[in-house]
Amino acid sequence: MQIRAALPALAGAVVLTGTILSTPAQAAGSVYIYEVYYDSPGSDGGSNASLNAEWVKIKNSTSSTVSLKNWKIKDATGYTYTFGDVKIGAGATKKVHTGKGTNTATDKYWGRSWYVWNNTGDTAKLYKASGTKVDSCSWSSRGSGYKYC
């Protein structure tokens, strides 16, 4: 009975807003945080291989290429990665690894010598070059070591 009562309200919201309620990234195609691998496998000893097993994946769900120049990824304490002159194709992803490495078309490297993402809880945030927050993804427990956002 409660479901039937909610349907007219939902229908009214769709008529007023023109959209069905969902996350911003899913509602109207955008660039967003797709996945965070916050707990690299094994012990957190700080090796470059371990640091690079910690990453954030950004996805472009639009039908156009988007420039990420000067976009930023930040954690809750303010550690910041800034994209260079990088573009992300329609439907494509980019992975930003914590450690050092050679940037490729699909993988970027933060160049840090210690971990960014807290295993027991943190928030990854994505900002446009203008400073506008585009998306965020949070976790509050160790869990599986990764989170689809």
Image (tube, helix red, strand yellow):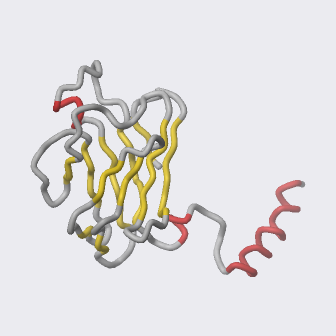
Image quadrant of residue 4? bottom right
Image coordinates for residue 74, horizontal then vertical, percent = 40, 49
- The furthest residue to the left: 102
Q: Is residue 11 above or below residue 135?
A: below
Image coordinates for residue 63, horizontal then vertical, percent = 35, 77
> Closest to the observer: 7 or 49?
49
- Say how many tags the image has: 0
> Closest to the observer: 52 or 89?
52
In the shown orientation, is residue 31 left or right of residue 85? Answer: right
- Which quarter of the rendered picture does the N terminus lie within? bottom right
Image coordinates for residue 26, horizontal then vertical, percent = 51, 65
- The furthest residue to the front: 78
Q: Is residue 26 above or below residue 101?
A: below
- Residue at horizontal 40 percent and vertical 66 percent from the top: 31
Image coordinates for residue 56, horizontal then vertical, percent = 34, 47
- Residue at horizontal 30 percent and vertical 42 percent from the top: 55
> Closest to the observer: 85 or 62?
85
- Residue at horizontal 22 percent and vertical 33 percent from the top: 113
